[in-house]
Amino acid sequence: MGKNDFNRGSVLIATTLMLMTSAANSGTLSGQVVGITDGDTLTLLVDRQQYKIRIAGIDAPERHQAWGDKSKANISRLAFNQTAAANCPK
């Protein structure tokens, strides 16, 4: 993967982090990505509370499916330890 692909991936992550979550409140959560479950699910740490976030509009393979490990590795490389904002509809 070249530098342009990485930059494109970073922009993609930044723009697709309009996320859905099961958080009880509506609004925007902003915090640090502290965990990656699979290619379309991550954990966001906000004020010492963790939220499991599912990225809207992304249907990545699950860990046990073909390409699941690669999908998780790619989102991890792009998002882990990064600051992210999640739009949380009620």
Image: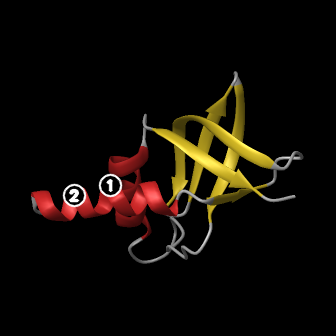
Which residue occupies the foreground of this view, 10 or 39? 10
Disc 1: CA contacts within 10 A as few (<14), some (14-19) or many (>=20): some
For badge 1, the amino acid type reads Ser
Residue drawn at 71 percent across, 45 percent down: 28
> Which residue is depicted at the point 67% across and 30% down?
46
At 32% from the left and 55% from the top, the residue drawn is: 10
Quarter of the N terminus within the rendering? bottom left
Mark 2 neighbour density, 10 Å: few (under 14) some (14–19) many (20 or more): few
Picture quadrant of residue 5:
bottom left
User: x, y percentage for residue 9?
Assistant: 30, 61
Q: Which mark is residue 10?
A: 1
Q: Which residue is mark 2?
A: 6
Residue 51's image quarter? top right
CA separation in Å, label 1 and label 2: 6 Å
Which dot marks residue 41?
none
Q: Is 53 on the left or on the right of 78, as rendered?
A: right
**Residue type pointed to by label 2:** Phe
Q: Position of residue 36 (x, y in %)?
A: 51, 48
Circle 1: element type: helix
* CB within 8 Å, label 1 to label 2: yes
> Is 29 rendered above or below residue 18?
above
Task: Looking at the picture, tell me which residue is in the foreground, 90 or 1.
Answer: 90
In the picture as drawn, the residue positioned furthest to the top comes out as 48
Name the foreground residue: 17 vs 58. 17
Please tell me whether mark 2 sits on a helix, a strand or a loop.
Answer: helix
Position of 56 relative to 78 (above/below): below
* Percent position of residue 90, x then y: 87, 58
